[in-house]
Amino acid sequence: MAITVAVSNQKGGVGKTTTALHLAVAAALAGRRVLLIDLDSQANATTALGVEEATIDRPGSYLALLNSEQVRPDWARATDIPGLSVLASSLEMAGIELELAEQSDRLRRLRPVIATMGETFDWIFLDCPPSLGILSVNALVAADTVLIPVPPEQFALDGMERLTSTITRLNEGGQTRITTPSILITMAQSWSPEKLKRANRIRQTHGEEVLTAEIPHSNAVGQASGERRPVFMSRPKADASDAYMRAAAQLILRHETGSDAQPEDIEPLVEQMRAGLQPLGGPQTRPDPSEDLHHRRRRRHRRHDHGDGPRIYRSRRRLRHAAGTVVLIIGALLITFMLLGAL
Ligand SMILES: Nc1ncnc2c1ncn2[C@@H]1O[C@H](COP(=O)(O)OP(=O)(O)O)[C@@H](O)[C@H]1O
Ligand SMILES: [Mg+2]
């Protein structure tokens, strides 16, 4: 039976979809059979995997929730990534909360879907919408665990607190089996003292619930989502690629072995993910041991040139160039005036 993870935070823009997508891809690269259930009407996770939005002929998560007893495993659509399928979403999903509002089992619609799909997959990831409405509660009720993406921003922390108190309430009513959540710090910015302080506070308050890997705020992720591709495929060497693989490895080991993973357990799984990327056209993802320091430095510079790094550094560089040019022009004018004065 599959291990089901609800990727949830009631706030929008915290990295839920990006996280659900990358954890699902990473788990598939590690050889697991994975299903991503897209519960968001924006269907971003669906299209990022190259799958078209669901329709009447090709049903997805919307029809699965409305007709949960009729769901068949072949509703899950295979992607180009071996082992990874998606239960596609579509715009109709935006109205489903109203459609289910009168149903007595409205909070338990996803359970039979997971039961059917769980036979053919090892892991199921649920990409939740940005609210704590019927859909997100369905995900919490059906899931074995929850993963909360949290950028080090106050608004996202508020969203996390509200979600954890909802889980506690559902637990008290015996409606979920979630015991401890996993928390993933997303969009981390180590050059911002304020964000660093908040990230540290999350770790102090929530201890081992917080996954060791932190997803950096990375232009590579933004670009990949613009190209509708996982960052593993578009920029396998970006720091964010590595961080998502490490987060996935820790989550997999936490739930497959039932105990928290040691750093030495994580590395082989990350290696397996990198190896899984090779046949998909990913370039060599490990640094070549023969590569000298000079080449590695040059590669790092090239990476910054391509925009994987804090934009602020690039704008400071431009400012320095502009200031240099102004100083040169003023110097040239001064010399010209002095020469004219001397004549
Ligand atoms: N680590 C990251 N670095 C930079 N941009 C990111 C990162 N994670 C997500 N984003 C961008 O932030 C936006 C919101 O992310 P998304 O995953 O859709 O959030 P949610 O599903 O919580 O609304 C998207 O444009 C996405 O590309
Ligand atoms: Mg989303």
Image (cartoon, rainbow, N blue to C red):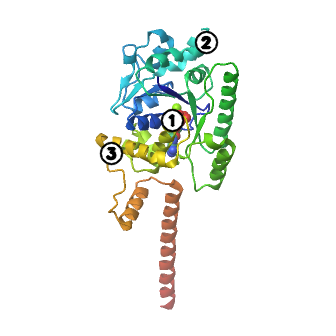
Q: Is residue 67 visible?
A: no
Q: Residue at x 54, y 34 (%)?
A: 258
Circle 3 — which element?
loop
* Residue 126 placement (x, y as % from top left): 51, 27
- What residue is rendered at 46% in x and 19% in y? 61
Between residue 87 and residue 323, name the one nearer to us: 87
> Residue at label 1?
257
Secondary structure under the numbered disc 2 in the rendered image? loop
**Numbered mark located on residue 101 in the image:** 2
Of callouts 1 and 3, the N-terminal one: 1
Query: Does the closest atom of ligand 2 sit within 8 Å of the Cβ of label 2?
Result: no
Give the residue type that dot 2 points to: Ala
Q: Three-letter amino acid code at disc 1?
A: Thr
Residue bearing mark 3: 282
Q: Which of disc 2 and disc 3 is earlier in sequence?
A: 2
Q: Quick check: marks 3 and 2 in contact, CB under 8 Å?
A: no
**Three-letter code for the amino acid on which mark 3 is drawn:** Gly
Separation of marks 3 and 2 at Cα, in angstroms: 45 Å
With respect to residue 9, does 116 lie above or below?
above
